[in-house]
C-alpha cells in the first residue's frame, strides 16, 4: 500500500500538514492496529503517535524512515 497516494500534501513534523490528510492517516493506522483511536476521536494535528506510526510503516516496508510521507509515495531505503 502506498500511503502517499492518498495525500494532498506532504505530511511530517514541522510541515503545514493538511488536517484532512492527518485524519485519513490516523484512521488508516487505527484500522491496521498501529494506532489506538481515542474515545473522543483523533485530533486533526500531526503528533508523536502519528509520527511513530509513519516511521514504523516505513521501516516495515523498507522505505526511508524519516517520518515524512509525500504525495505519490515514499522513498525506498
Image: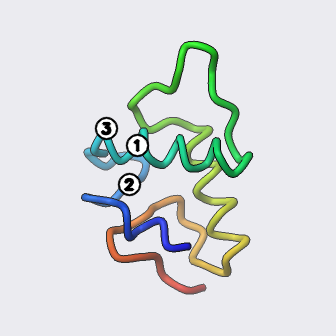
Q: Give above or below for 39 relative to 63.
A: above
Which mark is nearer the camera, 2 or 3? 3
Classify mark 3: helix, strand or loop: helix
Q: Are marks 2 and 1 in contact (CB under 8 Å)?
A: yes
* Residue ranking furthest to the front: 31
Alpha carbon distance from label 3 to label 1: 5 Å
**Residue 19 image label:** 3
Rendered image quadrant of residue 50 = top right
Residue occupying image coordinates x 48% and y 82%: 75
Residue occupying image coordinates x 58% and y 38%: 48
Residue occupying image coordinates x 43% and y 45%: 24
* Residue ranking furthest to the bottom: 76
**Residue 22 image label:** 1
Q: Is residue 36 left or right of residue 24?
A: right
Alpha carbon distance from label 2 to label 1: 7 Å
Residue occupying image coordinates x 69% and y 51%: 32
Q: Give above or below for 26 relative to 55.
A: above
Where does the C terminus fall, quadrant-wise?
Answer: bottom right
Colour mode of the rendering: rainbow
**Of the image marks 2 and 1, the number of the one nearer the N terminus:** 2
**Residue 11 image label:** 2
Rendered image quadrant of residue 72 = bottom left
Amino acid at each position: 500500500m502506498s500511503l502517499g497516494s492518498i495525500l494532498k500534501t506532504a505530511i511530517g513534523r514541522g510541515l503545514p500538514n493538511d488536517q484532512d490528510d492527518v485524519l485519513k492517516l490516523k484512521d488508516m493506522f487505527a484500522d491496521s492496529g498501529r494506532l489506538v483511536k481515542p474515545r473522543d476521536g483523533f485530533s486533526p494535528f500531526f503528533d508523536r503517535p502519528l509520527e511513530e506510526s509513519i516511521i514504523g510503516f516505513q521501516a516495515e516496508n523498507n522505505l526511508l524512515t524519516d517520518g515524512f510521507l509525500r504525495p505519490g509515495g515514499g522513498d525506498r531505503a
